[in-house]
Image (tube, rainbow, N blue to C red):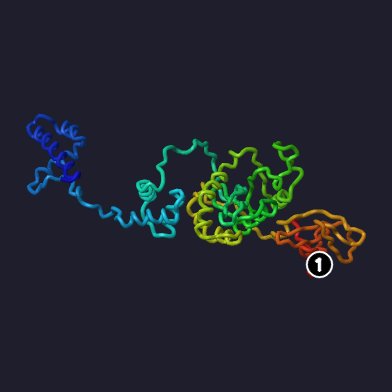
């Protein structure tokens, strides 16, 4: 006799005893229901079923039958093999996301997790997460963005750590810009800001740490000096974006937790994809990973309105280094070891711009004097003036 049949037999015997006492008037409907741990309605329904002529001893005819929704052995073996052969070491949620996206798995997250636990491929969690105090998100997208970098062995086959620069919206946790660079700095920060503005528009504020490319800090660990702007600070001021400094890691908790997720997922995906170069990693990040990441982790903002403002100016003229220089007696300007020769001009006080693509330009106020390549060689350009805000 199977276990299902024994249980059903016990249920039947116990019900018959209570039913006999109920028919003999020894107990009431409520008392009979209580003895069987039923509601009164359930007891009366089972009483009617018991009194039917064709009653076969089973109150639940589903017992002993295989559910049509139960996973077949082949499906269980497929999920176990998929994890064991291609995704060993992935956490369950990451594996579940990829299994649904690329391998046609339709079962629930709980089913997949329990299947892997029963196969001893992952360990059952023994404790909950850390207790955290939640900081309320901004109500609208574009109100505040976070930007941070993380140095890590992101590309295992590259063999050395690089920096991942991420910019994300506080209201939704959407990653608006992300890319790998050899080392975090001014150029990478400006690139993340520029990519976000080009795609979404001008935002209200940027929240960052107090790295030297973001702020000038006279005393280590002290307050920043906002009267002395870095290149990033100058750009944000020109754009009208408020720059908010962080004085504790907890203040950057949202981006810190996001980096924890990325460190648990990206290296494994890049390893699985056989990616070995920075260029290929950035391509995979942009085309494959980020769309799936945002789809999974973005949350709905409190307000459907947007604080982004469409950008219609010349962004390149703002997103650059900008340093003042004096013209020498031989009509040259010195910049990073280069001598930039300028043509005949009555102006003697200039400043140099270095664009993100490596080219240089000399201006006198709004007037463009000349453009140069990264070797200091002059390029032919049309005489233009720089747009200025009225």
Residue at position x 69%, y 59% from top?
A: 315
The quadrant in which the N terminus is found is top left
Counting from the top left corner in percent of width and height, residue 273 is at: 51, 60
User: Number of numbered discs present?
Assistant: 1
Q: Is residue 81 left or right of residue 28?
A: right
The residue positioned farthest toward the right in the image shown: 329
* Mark 1, residue position: 378
Task: Pick the residue in front: 304 or 294.
Answer: 294
Q: Residues within 10 Å of mark 1 (few under 14, many from 20)?
A: some
Residue 100 rendering spot, x and y as whole percentages: 41, 56
- Vertically, is 46 above or below 193? above
Instruction: Name which quarter of the figure residue 356 lies in.
Output: bottom right
Q: Residue at x 49, y 50 (%)?
A: 297
Residue 147 visible somewhere in the drawing: no
Q: Is residue 380 above or below residue 169?
A: below
| Residue 140 seen in render | yes
- Dividing the picture into quadrants, the one containing residue 225 is top right
Residue 216 placement (x, y as % from top left) = 74, 43
């Amino acid at each position: 006799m199977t276990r299902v049949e024994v249980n059903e037999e016990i249920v039947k015997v116990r019900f018959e005893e209570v039913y006999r006492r109920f028919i003999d008037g020894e107990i009431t409907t409520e008392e009979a229901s209580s003895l069987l741990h039923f509601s009164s309605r359930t007891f009366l329904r089972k009483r009617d079923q018991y009194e039917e002529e064709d009653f076969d001893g089973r109150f639940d005819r589903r017992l002993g039958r295989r559910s049509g929704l139960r996973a077949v052995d082949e499906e269980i073996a497929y999920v176990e093999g998929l994890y064991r052969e291609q995704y060993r070491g992935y956490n369950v949620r990451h594996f579940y996301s990829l299994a649904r996206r690329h391998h046609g798995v339709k079962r629930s997250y709980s089913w997949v997790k329990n299947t892997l636990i029963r196969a001893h491929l992952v360990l059952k969690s023994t404790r909950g997460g850390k207790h955290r105090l939640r900081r309320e998100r901004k109500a609208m997208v574009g109100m505040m963005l976070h930007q941070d970098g993380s140095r890590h062995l992101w590309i295992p086959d590259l063999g050395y750590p690089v920096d991942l620069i991420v910019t994300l919206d506080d209201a939704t946790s959407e990653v608006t810009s992300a890319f790998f660079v050899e080392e975090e700095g001014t150029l990478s920060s400006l690139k993340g800001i520029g990519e976000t503005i080009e795609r979404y528009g001008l935002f209200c504020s940027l929240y960052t740490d107090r790295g030297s490319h973001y702020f000038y800090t006279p005393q280590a660990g002290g307050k920043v000096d906002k009267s002395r702007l870095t290149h990033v600070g100058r750009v944000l001021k020109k754009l009208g974006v408020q720059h908010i400094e962080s004085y504790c890691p907890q203040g950057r908790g949202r981006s810190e937790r996001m980096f924890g997720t990325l460190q648990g997922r990206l290296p494994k995906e890049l390893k699985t994809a056989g990616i070995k170069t920075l260029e290929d990693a950035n391509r995979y990040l942009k085309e494959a990973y980020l769309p799936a990441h945002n789809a999974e982790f973005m949350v709905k903002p409190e307000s459907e309105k947007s604080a982004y403002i469409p950008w219609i100016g010349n962004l390149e003229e703002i997103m650059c280094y900008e340093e003042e220089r004096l013209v020498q007696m031989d009509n040259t300007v010195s910049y990073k070891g280069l001598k930039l020769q300028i043509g005949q001009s009555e102006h003697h006080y200039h400043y140099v711009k270095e664009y993100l693509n490596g080219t240089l330009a000399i201006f006198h106020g709004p007037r463009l004097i000349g453009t140069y390549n990264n070797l200091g060689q002059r390029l032919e350009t049309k005489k233009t003036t720089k747009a200025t805000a009225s």
